[in-house]
Amino acid sequence: MSEIVVFCRIKNGKPTRNSLEGIGAGFKVAGALGISVGAMVTFKPGDEGAFEELIAHGAETVYAVQVVEEDSLYSETGLYAAEKVCHEVKPRLVLLVADTDGKDVGPRLAYRLGAGIVSECIDLEVDGTDNGVYGLKPVYGGKALARIAARKIQVFTLREHAFEALEKDTGRKGEVKKIDVGLRPEAQNIRQIDFIEEEHAGIKLEEADIVVSGGRGVGGKNQFQKIEELSKIFKGAPAASRAAVDAGWAPVSYQVGQTGKIIAPNLYLAIGISGASQHLAGISGSKCIVAINKDPDAPIFRSAQYGIVEEYQKILPILKERIKAMLV
Amino acid sequence: MKIAVCVKQILDPELPPSAFEIDKTLQQAKTGNKAQVLDPYSGNALELALQLKDKRPDVKVTALTFGNSKAEDVLRKCLGVLVDEAIHVLYERMLVPDSYATAMVLAAAIERTGPYDLILCGRQAGDWDAGLIGSLLGEMLSMPSVCFVSKLDFSDHGIMIERYVDGGTQVLASDMPVLVTVTNDETNVIRIAKVKDVMKAHRKPILRLEPNQLDIPEADIALVKASAGIQDLFIPEQVSNCEIIEGEDPGEKVEKLLVGLKQQKLF
């Protein structure tokens, strides 16, 4: 029987990338604990193809819960199904990637299972002596790391993209167990009225190879347009720190950081960004970080590969012209 | 209509890493005389409550915190931006309560001083970034909860909620009571208090409660005992290999940067 249950999700007939990363995280500790990894999903008719995909990425059992209709808040559907599956499977560990749904479901599921919970882990460790599992979690804005045990039954939520999915291998064997959980009693009275899809003029921030990002040092809404212009010339996407969003210079959809988007572009150009740890948490997967800041002591320089200590206004126009000339 | 906002005092997140120290016995950051501030997401939650109060005069906003005696400062700040009532659940024990214990105490304080039509929390606090309190409170109070809310407004029968989810913004209509956790947005930056209100805030009453005056269910106490234990807290080593690009003028710096980026085939 699977003793690690990973909360997974099917979207457009396929498991999400986060689901596969969650299974990958489960595998990291399953070997040391001598237990197996199962994936828990809700599905609608037509989604069954996703089960094979979950198995090919390492799920030894797929606990599949059929739902007729998802609630306006998917977390309600997912929570109800996860609770029922866990009561039946009695897992030792439950893992959820901390995306919108994972962050919402994790603590509530833990409470309902009487389990301990550690949130937003960037690594999981097994203690060889007592087989205890610990989550490693950045705290105080990344200035410190905490190693935390969630005793008894354990629920861990995992930072997005901190774990890697296993390579797809269609030779893997696994079993699909359909679990009937019945209808969820009295849905709460919260109804979706509208869904406004995020707009992005060019390439999606999460998918861009090159990201040009501005922070408090950019200095104003008009100046922020220079960031957007440069991102266009690079054929990349614009981004912002929380400080620039709070100042009203950039929309929230630009926000990168622990509570914004977590991205991993090839090139991240940080302009007038001091580099608070919360911001760095969102870009640590970048291949190359370039920082332009007039303050030589800005923490961003410690995470950057290249740094230019200068007022960005002096650098940007030259950089713009040079890139334009190169890409023609 | 009554609104409760749960707020937290945290070590100033802007504290430079060079000034950051760990107390190994308590497994937490040393606060000492270092600046402590209102958690930024608590500030966003507070602002949303105040915006509702601006729209309807019958709204009463209560700010609630669980913390040591120093945490009174954040309640004074809340009174300065004109919340109607401030409640301080005090703990003076040395150990820092974990999320379960904190949620349990807040839930009991809410039961004791409520009922409330709306409960707001920050999505997570900027020190431990756990993001558990709101959801746990919802469970403990058997109240529906909605996470990552950026805007609130009254509707005919209840409340309109805007929330950020992966891929967009969801607009919801909900009955009350409901609990929401608040995320930042350009429209919910905490307002600046007027000087005269800050002065008055120092003289306003604060309701003080001790955890042992609250009615905490046995089952929840058992949960606290079984919950997270911090095994270690440490400052990670950081190796910097940043190449600061020197040059006579900005033009030379840009040229050198481009050479580096091209070598790595970054574009």
Image: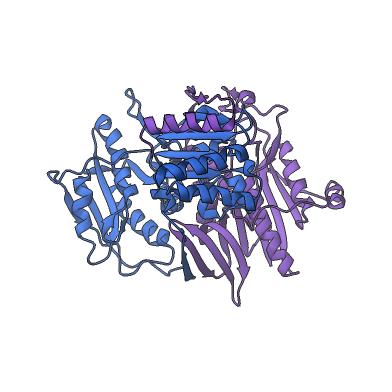
From the top left corner, tell me how far across and down residue A236 is, in percent: 43, 48
- Give the chain ID for the blue colour: A
Determine the residue positioned at 42% across, 70% down.
Answer: A186
Q: From the viewer's perspective, is residue A76 above or below residue A291?
A: below
Residue placed most toward the observer, A31 or B87: A31
**For the view shown, which residue lies furthest in the left direction?**
A171
Determine the residue positioned at 78% across, 49% down.
Answer: B206
Q: Name the image quarter holding residue A297.
A: top right
Q: Name the image quarter holding residue A251.
A: bottom right
Is residue A126 rendered to the left or right of residue A229? left
Q: Is residue B130 visible?
A: no
Q: Name the image quarter holding residue A317.
A: top right
Determine the residue positioned at 84% across, 52% down.
Answer: B197
Q: How many numbered discs sit on the rendered protein? A: 0
From the top left corner, tell me how far across and down residue B244 is, in percent: 53, 25
Q: From the viewer's perspective, is residue A115 above or below residue A51?
A: above
From the top left corner, tell me how far across and down residue A142 is, in percent: 52, 33
Is residue B250 rendered to the left or right of residue A328? right
The N terminus of chain A - image quarter: top left
The colour mode here is by chain
Determine the residue positioned at 60% across, 74% down.
Answer: B155
Is residue B60 rendered to the left or right of residue A186? right
**For the view shown, which residue lies furthest in the bottom direction?**
B156
Is residue A113 rendered to the left or right of residue B66? left
Q: Is residue B146 visible?
A: yes
From the top left corner, tell me how far across and down residue A88 is, in percent: 28, 52
Colour assignment, chain B: purple
